[in-house]
Amino acid sequence: MSRYQDNLPAYDEGTLPEYSCEDIELGPSNEKYGLEIKKPLPSDDFEESFPVEQPKWTDWPFAVVFEVVLVLFLGLLMFTTQDVVVEIANVNPDQTRLIGLVLATGVVCSYGGIVVLRKWPTVFIHAGCLLNVAAASALTIGALSNGNLWTGVGIGFLALLHVVWYIEVRRRIPLSSLILKQVIDVAHKNPVTWKVSACGTLVSAVFSLATVIAAYGTMVKWGLDDTGQLKNKTMFVAMGMFVLFTGTFIAEVLKNVLHSTVAGVYGSWYYLSHADRCPKNAGFAAFRRSVTYSFGSICFGSLIISVIQTLNSVAGLAKHWAAQDGGLAGYIGFYIIEIFASIMESMVRWLNEYAYSLVSLYGLDFLHAARGAFALVEQKGLSAPINDCLINTALGLYSLFVAQMCGIVSVLFVFTTQPAWAQNTEGVVDVNMGVVLVVLFASAFGFFVANVATSVVHSGTVTFFIMLAKDPEVYKATHPDEFARVFAVYPDVERKLQIDDF
């Protein structure tokens, strides 16, 4: 028997292991911060297992903000595309076929990855790393063969970085594989998670298409005219930023509702899978809580991320304009803003994801959940295991691969069919602004769809880590074999979780 199993407590199937509900110590002053949550109770109903005393609509003003943004987005979509939709559907069949082809590529590649993920999790992690090298290499060869030297060199450099990174992180794959197998096992036992993923992907695909149409309509309405001049620069910039912000905000809300729904399923498994009764409606009940009482909190966190992302994109565009105008000071200033926004986005996104798991399970408001999640992870010292877990990295790289595949498909379509809208004044298709925008939109669509499709695994991993940080003895008692295997691969986790002194 493993040395990690020698002192495992006996487990009574009818009794849940005790775990701490004490306050969390914050900072050097040992300030106490209570999570104000109760122990989950064995029950067939999610609301009874994870009760919320006197349910209230948390952070409701931000739900109102989302509804206003959604209405404005739909209004802009109808206003800018009332003629564009007809044009795409009837006058320009090439664009219609291209949209359909990119849509099919994104969905097929995304769910092809899920099939591999379910059957061969270790292979998926390796594939998520190596497929990006292959796709980047293909783009490099394509760029160089078309005479785009610097583009090819840039993409080739990225491919080389992927290779170096893969060699460096291979030692971490065993731990990630073990955790991924655990997450997948839970998904197998709860098929509702895959149904949630399918519904989320469908809704996200439709919304992504609507965003692309809105962006295209904005370009037609206020963009370049036949002379190459902007029809209305002020409206074009303002509406372009608005589409960018609203598209990001709505997409974040959709993704986080999906995350909170899956968190309910994994939270029920973590605490009650070995109890005499476990919620049978965890997926639906968690979804209902996410779109009612907790919807404002989800919108709150999504709004923060959306503002930072928009700032990042605007800074990048402004940096490009400053470089064109020769403004060195402006270029440096916007470059610093872009770096700062990128760092902030990574930090806030990490905190948001862990907070949403607590929001889903305990009905907390966003600030309360975010502070509690941060305190849990910091106090339990889980930063190293989380950073060493390649699951989320592999999922992100696979989403990047799907984005590259959609981009490659769009390029092949354009250069194969030679559509009139992609030709220059000499009647030849080259890498002009229209083609670049098509590739960018196709890649963005592929990345977003793949990101949503694989978010079940990501959400399960996040929820697993936050529950492990909060109540590690539950996992030790209910899953001793898995507990021992994880520590056999990563012994330092036991010290970081401080299980003996918890």
Image (tube, rainbow, N blue to C red):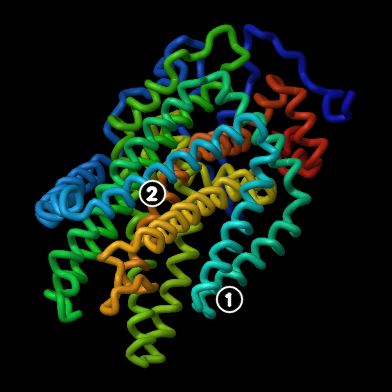
Q: Are marks 2 and 1 in contact (CB under 8 Å)?
A: no
- Left or right, 229 with reference to 151: left
In-image side of 284 versus 243 (left or right): right
Is disc 2 surrounded by few (<14), some (14 to 19) or many (20+) residues within 10 Å? many
* Residue 170 x, y percent position in the rendering: 75, 52
Q: Which image quadrant: the N terminus?
A: top right
Q: Which residue is mark 2?
A: 102
Question: Is residue 240 in view?
Answer: yes
- In the picture of the structure, the residue carrying the numbered disc 1 is 153
Vertical comparison of 484 with 228: above or below: above
Q: In the image, what residue occupies the spot 63% across and 10% down?
A: 15
State the residue at coordinates (38%, 21%): 284
Q: Which numbered disc flags the more N-terminal residue, 2 or 1?
A: 2
- Crowd tier of the residue under label 1, counting other residues whose Cα lies within 10 Å: few below 14, some 14–19, many 20 or above: some
Specify the label residue 309 is tagged with. none
Please tell me whether mark 1 sits on a helix, a strand or a loop. Answer: helix
The percent coordinates of residue 247 (x first, y second) are 29, 53
Amino acid residing under circle 1: Val
Q: What's under tag 2, amino acid-wise? A: Val
Compute the Cα span from label 2 to label 1. Answer: 26 Å
Q: Residue at x 66, y 36 (%)?
A: 121
> How far across and how far down the image is residue 223, in percent?
18, 71
Give me the residue at 40% from left, 35% from top. Answer: 258
Q: Is residue 164 left or right of residue 243?
A: right
